Image: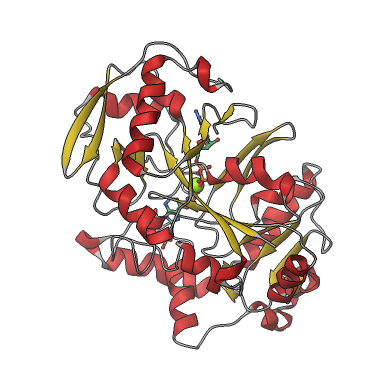
Amino acid sequence: MPADVVIGGQWGDEGKGKIVDLMASDYSAVARFSGGNNAGHTVINDLGEFKLHLIPSGILNRKIKCVIGNGCVVDPAVLIEEMENLINTGVKVTPENLIISNKAHIIMPEHIKLDNKQEKEREDLKIGTTGRGIGPAYMDKVARNGFRMEDISRWPEWSEKLSKFVGDTQKLLRSKLGKKENILLEGAQGALLDIDHGSYPFVTSSNSTIGGALTGTGLVPADIRNIIGIFKAYATRVGEGPFPSEIPKTESVADYILKKGHEFGTTTGRERRCGWFDLDSAYYSIMTNGFNKIAIMKLDVLDGIKEIKVLKNDDYITLPGWDQSTFGIDDYSKLPINAIKYIEFLEEELNVGISIISTGPERNQTIFKS
Ligand code: GDP
Ligand code: IMO
Ligand code: MG
């Protein structure tokens, strides 16, 4: 005991990968519980820069057991490629530190074709999927037509490389908790992309919120200690769908955030839509997940913006920005006064403690706030 959960509080790409990599050393296992290689989690540490799509971000920490849970969908070809890329850069990936649930569903080549065909047919109502076959793979799962990782032996070219990684992940996690070891559950996507609670139909096809952390691993509510919501200090969305605090492209600050924040999709390279922090959506996300801790990421991207806006009750509140750089600051008291005021404003409004503030992509560019 216990398990802690990291969940994206917005529309994905909040910086979950950085936080999981940063926290991982306190845990004996890191488990993904939903989604597939639609995710793109960037980790920058002393080993280099990594873009992980399916393998948990804990993989860069040699001692950790990484788990791909039953709630995930696995594209075997992509997984093999990701494993080989990691191995080629010197990262250990063996059955000793990676286990894939026998119940995780397989993304078949037809699923990818169908995903792209469906998108084409949606014409004006496109979702803007990542085109990785995610929706159709979950369709087959729910229709009870799917293939699971336990069926991998039917495909010689995949089975040879993957079958030794397949096992009972629920039992493994349970046994770790029984030995009083800590587990970290790594969310993918974000609360507002959840199939049930997100902005349907502009959502992904799995439960990226707290319920998915349980069904997607086989853990139970009593196992969970902290539910950590990851939010950017502003907001982004990639793909179609409502985005209440979106900044119109005609305002130069939209481009400023896009460029300063390198807001291009990790998986598809698409430009992310940029907007202000949306309190209304954040309240909803807190309610849906029960976050008891929050991390505010990419504060440094707001450096140099004169007036920072925040959406509340469908209206904008304007707060003064700051000129000084916050990039890399690791001590709360060293932040510019207006940055502290911004954090305090968010904390008061959200009514959940902000325990982490991130000021850059690297591990040490982080403030731990009590
Ligand atoms: P994830 O999907 O939630 O793991 O997030 P992504 O990796 O898709 O996107 C977050 C991006 O922001 C990555 O390129 C990170 O390296 C970067 N990043 C994370 N935290 C910070 C931060 O505090 N400041 C800046 N400037 N970049 C950050
Ligand atoms: P991470 O884990 C941001 C979005 C897609 C699209 C919608 C449905 O890196 O935060 P899908 O391919 O899942 O059927 O696409 O969901 N989407 C993401 N957006 N970050 C992600 O993951 C995403 N995974 C899916 O852009 O709008
Ligand atoms: Mg991402």
| Quarter of the image where one finds residue 90 | top right
Q: Position of residue 161 (x, y in %)?
A: 78, 67
Residue under the image location 64 percent in, 32 percent down: 363
**Image quadrant occupied by the N terminus:** bottom right
Residue under the image location 62 percent in, 67 percent down: 223
- Is residue 192 among the parts visible in the rendering? no
Q: Quadrant of ligand 2?
A: bottom left
- Is residue 358 among the parts visible in the rendering? yes
Residue under the image location 70 percent in, 84 percent down: 154
Q: Position of residue 263 (x, y in %)?
A: 42, 35
- Locate residue 345 relative to residue 207 in the image: left or right: left
| Quarter of the image where one finds residue 173 | bottom right
Q: Position of residue 116 (x, y in %)?
A: 39, 64
As drawn, the residue found furthest toward the bottom would be: 144
- Locate residue 56 relative to residue 180 in the image: left or right: left
**Image quadrant occupied by the C terminus:** top right
- Locate residue 151 relative to residue 308 in the image: left or right: right
Q: Is residue 322 above or below residue 73?
A: above
